[in-house]
């Protein structure tokens, strides 16, 4: 019987969702025959892992502390196997600015963007560039913290006078922000399994919601968003699948991740990769597995395939 620690919770702003994901994953692992300890990660985590000596850790920590490579770094020092992307790919994908830079280098389509830091805004006059940003992206600007998940701190700006307030809001979540060209299209979520060099793309999910963006509420509050199989023409579906696989490979992901995409008349645009997507009942990743004919337990087993080998 495999001994598995499910790491969840922690100190990020996505703590409550992470606890939900972790408990659900823990139940699935137990149903698969593992001896499971679901752990709310805190200062005692390393000592617990050393004492318990698990065969591996199932990562269910969302946001800072989990998706940024922090826990992965520690587990690598301890020589304990874990599910999901390694520390480097995790840190890369959580930082939207760096991830989009990799996409650009690898010719993976991502909306044009600019980025600057709090220091540039407060000390070097970055506010003087905002009129140019609006000129370059007249359709609108999506203002994002560079390193947050679940759409925390994101605003859509269509008028120049609203941009400064949106930046201040985003900077309450991170010291670096993105100013990304607004793409208005269909919101798609593409879940990918396996290694970076042989990604397995699950059926494409589409999200519809009343908010202007796929907000934190739409992510997790039942009834706030509808998630269903995307109805796409075969050639369009192929382009979306290919773009998701290329992004996953470019970032060096492994085991599983969710690639967020906007689809307009110009094609698919990669927004970001969630290396530890939510495993809640409302999440697109579990739905994608279901659409692919997998039970939730089978989905968890697929995530664990590498560390179980």
Image (cartoon, grey):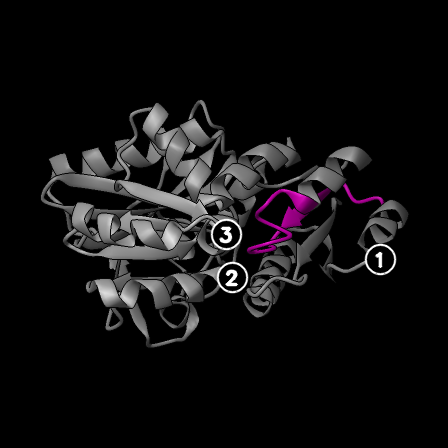
| Closer mark to the observer between disc 2 and disc 1 | 2
Q: Nearer the viewer, residue 102 or 267?
A: 102
Residue under pointer 3: 123
Mark 3 burial class by Cα count in 10 Å: few <14, some 14-19, many 20+ = few
Q: Position of residue 49 (x, y in %)?
A: 82, 48
User: Which secondary structure, mark 1?
Assistant: loop
- Judged left or right of residue 75, residue 109 is left
Residue at image point 73% right, 51% down: 5
One can see residue 213 in this view = no
Residue under pointer 1: 44
Stretch of the chain drawn in magenta: 53-70
One can see residue 33 in this view = yes
Q: Quadrant of residue 70?
A: top right
Residue under pointer 2: 173
Residue at image point 57% right, 67% down: 20
Marks 1/3: CA–CA distance: 39 Å
Residue 177 is a magenta residue = no
Q: Choose the circle earlier in sequence order: 2 or 3.
A: 3
Q: Quadrant of residue 39?
A: bottom right
Asked whether the residues under the numbered discs 1 and 3 touch, taking CB atoms below 8 Å apart as contact, a structural biologist would say: no
Residue at image point 88% right, 51% down: 47
Asked whether the residues under the numbered discs 2 and 1 touch, taking CB atoms below 8 Å apart as contact, a structural biologist would say: no
Residue 59 is a magenta residue = yes
| Closer mark to the observer between disc 1 and disc 3 | 3
Position of the N terminus, as image quadrant, is top right
| Closer mark to the observer between disc 2 and disc 3 | 3
Task: Give the residue furthest to the right.
Answer: 51
Marks 2/1: CA–CA distance: 26 Å
Q: Choose the circle earlier in sequence order: 1 or 3.
A: 1
Q: Is residue 18 above or below residue 294?
A: below
């Amino acid at each position: 019987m495999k001994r598995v620690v499910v790491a969840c919770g922690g100190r990020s702003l996505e703590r409550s969702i992470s606890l939900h994901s972790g408990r659900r994953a823990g139940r699935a692992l137990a149903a698969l025959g593992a001896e499971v300890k679901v752990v709310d990660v805190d200062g005692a985590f390393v000592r617990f892992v050393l004492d318990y000596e698990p065969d591996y850790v199932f990562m269910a920590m969302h946001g800072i502390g989990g998706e940024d490579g922090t826990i992965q770094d520690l587990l690598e020092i301890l020589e304990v196997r874990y599910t999901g992307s390694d520390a480097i790919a995790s840190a890369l994908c959580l930082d939207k600015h760096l991830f989009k830079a990799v996409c650009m280098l690898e010719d993976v389509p991502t909306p044009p963007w600019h980025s600057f830091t709090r220091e540039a805004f407060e000390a070097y006059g970055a506010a003087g560039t905002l009129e140019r940003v609006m000129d370059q992206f007249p359709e609108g600007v999506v203002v994002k913290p560079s390193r947050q998940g679940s759409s925390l701190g994101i605003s859509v700006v269509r008028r120049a006078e609203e941009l400064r307030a949106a930046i201040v809001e985003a900077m309450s979540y991170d010291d670096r922000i993105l100013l990304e060209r607004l793409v208005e299209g269909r919101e798609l979520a593409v879940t990918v399994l396996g290694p970076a060099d042989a990604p397995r793309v699950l059926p494409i999910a589409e999200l519809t919601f009343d908010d202007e963006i796929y907000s934190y509420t739409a992510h997790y509050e039942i009834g706030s968003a509808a998630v269903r199989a995307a109805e796409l023409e075969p050639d369009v579906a192929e382009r979306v699948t290919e773009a998701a696989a290329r992004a996953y490979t470019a970032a060096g992901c492994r085991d599983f991740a969710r690639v967020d995409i906007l689809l307009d008349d110009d094609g698919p645009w990669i927004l970001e990769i969630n290396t530890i997507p939510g495993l809640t009942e409302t999440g697109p990743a579990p739905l994608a597995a279901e659409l692919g004919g997998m039970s939730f337990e089978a989905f968890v087993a697929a995530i664990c395939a590498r560390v179980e080998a």
